[in-house]
Image: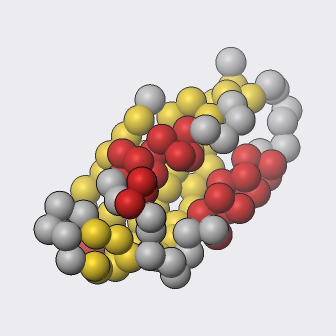
Amino acid sequence: MILIDVWSDFTASHRCAEGELHEHDWEVVATFRAPAYTDARIYRLALDTLLAGWEWTELPPELDWSEDICAAVMKLTDCVDVRVTRQGQRIAVRLA
Ligand SMILES: [Zn+2]
């Protein structure tokens, strides 16, 4: 089994536990189960396309938590593991 990691990032605002609107830079690493010799750029494109829809937006309530972002990324085809990191806070959430 081949596992391919791709990563990207986005900046958006949300309301987390405190309820006040604020901004984060999120880094997302997604792992895909792939056949051998797969062009990894297809996975990078899938991740980039998803994150581009969130860039510079106010995330909807269903994406308020890093766990929610993980779950949304995990819906990408062949994705088996996701880690979402808020670099400024040194917090990472992982869904596997
Ligand atoms: Zn926050």
In screen coordinates, is 89 left or right of 75?
left
Q: Position of residue 78 (x, y in %)?
A: 69, 31
Which residue is rendered at x = 29% and y = 80% of the image? Answer: 22
Q: Position of residue 87 (x, y in %)?
A: 32, 67
Whether residue 31 is visible: no
Residue nearest the viewer, comparing 63 with 89: 63
In screen coordinates, is 68 left or right of 51?
left
In screen coordinates, is 94 left or right of 44?
left
Residue nearest the viewer, comparing 55 with 58: 58
Quarter of the image that includes the N terminus: top right
Which residue is rendered at x = 65% and y = 58% of the image? Answer: 50
Which residue is rendered at x = 44% and y = 68% of the image? Answer: 59
Question: Which quadrant of the structure image shows residue 58?
Answer: bottom left
Residue nearest the viewer, comparing 59 with 73: 59
In screen coordinates, is 17 left or right of 78?
left
Question: Which quadrant of the structure image shows residue 20?
Answer: bottom left
Q: Position of residue 44 (x, y in %)?
A: 71, 54
Which residue is rendered at x = 75% and y = 57% of the image? Answer: 45
